[in-house]
Amino acid sequence: MPSPPNEGEDQGASPVNRPSVGSYQSSGKRKVRTKKKKGTISANITGTKYEIVRIVINEVDYIKAREDDETANLIWNDSAVQHERIAELRNYQRINHFPGMGEICRKDCLARNMSKMIKSQSQEYSFIPKTWIFPAEYTQFQNYVKELRRKRKQKTFIVKPANGAMGHGISLIRNCEKLPAHEHFIVQEYLDKPFLMEGYKFDLRIYILVTSCDPLRIFLYNDGLVRMGTEKYHAPSEANLSQLYMHLTNYSVNKHNENFERDETVDKGSKRSISWFNEFLRANDYDVAKFWGDVSVRG
């Protein structure tokens, strides 16, 4: 499992001991360059709406920069940042985005990259269900369905918009002939025998910090969220394909169900903590260390 950095470990160039570049101010005919105090760190957080970022900046005594200050040591933006802006950063500056993150954020791009990883390291990525990217792989998908029919097998598929989020537009299908050939979809075999918790499907929202892509360096936070469906799970059938509260675990979907349980404690309700999940695994005689070891290796 990824671990926190050791004290003294080289984490790259630190902005603390580097002189910061200030602005030039006019004083008669002479231009005077203002410098930030040695050892201070400035942060431009005008691009975020999240109060938690401001709280952390205050706690670590960073200096808040003006909106138009492009010399801040740290720049924090909620939205994606253009490649050009990242390329213009100076060596003492850090921004909370890596270029090219759309390659894993969009479902179609993620599926394409996962396909490459399966070809490269098939055993490590064997957990990925069969996936087709529409419209490019529409024909391959229909050929697969015809082969299933020939063998008298029936499978359920989950269809997701290529650039969707929060569960919008997701559906389960069995009658594959009705799928449009020219829409931008991701189609995957539906995993119909999931690990259940108290009879419900669930997913884990795991938080990580990526400090470097090459070499890849990831730190795994020791807690997170368990998001549960709000209808008890039954294997997919023609009668329940549309029951998304059963098949999907997205909070944005399940919060609309009258069965959604809001609870401030970490061990009840439709959203729980991963620390509680670890105790659930132990209580049911599962190997918690192996589980997180698998997550770390496959992640």
Image (spheres, helix red, strand yellow):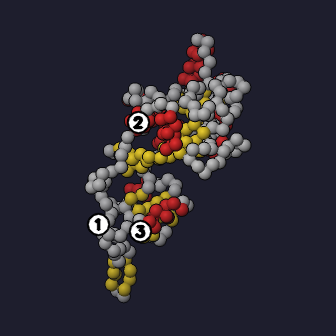
Q: What is the C-alpha distance between the residues marked 1 and 3?
A: 16 Å
> Residue 24: where, in percent of width, then height?
37, 77
> Residue 109: where, in percent of width, then height?
49, 38
Pick whichever of labels 3 and 2 is earlier in the sequence. Answer: 3
Please say whether residue 192 is visible from this viewpoint: yes
Quarter placement of the C terminus: top left
Q: Tell me: residue 50, above or below residue 153.
A: below
Please say whether residue 134 is visible from this viewpoint: no
Mark 3, secondary structure of its residue: loop
Q: What is the C-alpha distance between the residues marked 1 and 2?
A: 39 Å
Per the rendering, the mark at residue 17 is 1
- Residue annotated with mark 3: 61
> Residue 214: where, in percent of width, then height?
34, 45
Q: Amino acid at mark 3?
A: Asp
| Residue sitting at x 57%, y 31% | 196
Q: Amino acid at mark 2?
A: Ala
